[in-house]
Image: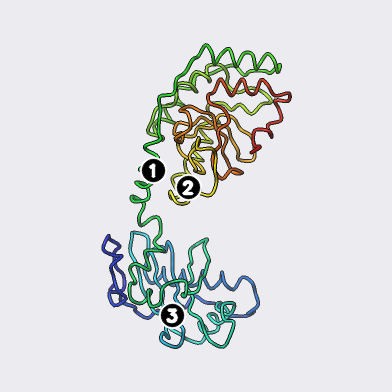
Amino acid sequence: MRNCIAYNEAFVDKKWTDFQFETLEIETLPPLEDPENFRNSFTFRDALLEAVENNAQKPVIKLLLLTPDFVFQFSYYVIAFLEGKEILTVELKQEERFKDWIKVITSDSRKSEKSYPQIFQFGTSQYSSQPASNFEKDFIYIDTGAFLYKFIPNEFIAEKLKKEKADFIRPFVNLNVPSDLKALAEAFRKLIEAKNLEVTVPVANDAVYEAFEKQAGFAFPQVLKDFFTLHNGVKNTAFMTAEAMLNEWKQWNDIYEEWTQEDLLDTYSTNEGKVLLMYTTPYWIPFFDLGNGNFIGLDLAPAEKGTPGQIIRFGADQEIGYQQAESLDAFLKQLLQEEEIVDWEWLLAE
């Protein structure tokens, strides 16, 4: 199709005249029965996505709808980012049913008789809009490639985003965490005896470590291997089994893989420079479940003032990670000092 182009590095330099806008009639819109129905926006979005996918014969990852100002621009334009790194551009035919629907969809953005151009952003689970005035005048219709790049789907630039994350974290990674099994075993024994806890008999975890290393791309830390020779969980505590640890690590790693470096980094929070200002990293390995998506874990990529192998807390209720102890045996000694080991809320205190 003439109105479908492949994404490449030169895309950012394209001008409006480099794109072909063939006319598309949306035949997927149902009759508008209740203009006040709160679901109208989603019905319109889904109908537009379906119409564009039918036209392109490809799934749509993200779609932009540009509305006119009725002064210089009188057309409704769609730019669709398609699976396979292609961009489809069409002009929507303004037949009567479409006019009824678009009036409802854009009504909230029109505070006077004058119409203000909007940029709608649609996806399977995405719906947002903003005024075109958020961008420099004529930016959309002149430096169109640069404008569209601001909305480029992560799937289009996955390699670049992956490299950004790798380049950021590489200087902090330190896998050389010392392990003193004797000291670890002694600290664990004292904790178990002092709190009268029941240890589940240790099991062989070679398959767990192999699965971790295959996905992570680095060796499972010896200090945790040593720790799991002492237990396979501790009843009525937050200590995790090696298998549970692997499952949780995978879920957090999925978040890391899906999010961009910009999404993960939080430059507004502080933690004394000991832990990276990140929501998560593959080098944080949870071994202690605080509940509600919060964990204590081993840190193999500390910040400048941190220590390799430090123990940190992170999770759903934490914007970034925080140091809890300088080492695993230090963390066990910390637990020994607490009166009630079953109540972990103190660990989440700032």
Rendered-image quadrant of the N terminus: bottom left
Of residues 288 and 139, the one drawn nearer to the viewer in this rendering: 139
SS label for mark 1: helix
Nearer the N terminus, badge 2 or badge 1? 1
Of residues 205 and 16, the one drawn nearer to the viewer in this rendering: 16
Q: Dot 3, crowdedness within 10 Å: few (<14), some or many (≥20)? A: some
Q: Dot 1, crowdedness within 10 Å: few (<14), some or many (≥20)? A: few
Give x and y (percent) for residue 59: 41, 62
Name which residue type carries label 3. Answer: Tyr
Q: Which residue is mark 3?
A: 76
Q: Which residue is mark 1?
A: 168
Q: Which residue is mark 2?
A: 265
Nearer the N terminus, badge 3 or badge 2? 3
Residue at the spot x=64%, y=37% of the render?
348
Counting labels gives 3
Rendered-image quadrant of the C terminus: top right
Give x and y (percent) for residue 183: 54, 13
Name which residue type carries label 2. Answer: Leu
In this rendering, the answer to whether 171 lies above or below 35 is above
How far is disc 1 from disc 3 in space, using C-alphas?
A: 41 Å
Give x and y (percent) for residue 133: 47, 75
Q: Dot 2, crowdedness within 10 Å: few (<14), some or many (≥20)? A: some
Colouring mode (rainbow / by chain / secondary structure / one colour): rainbow
Residue at the spot x=37%, y=50% of the render?
161
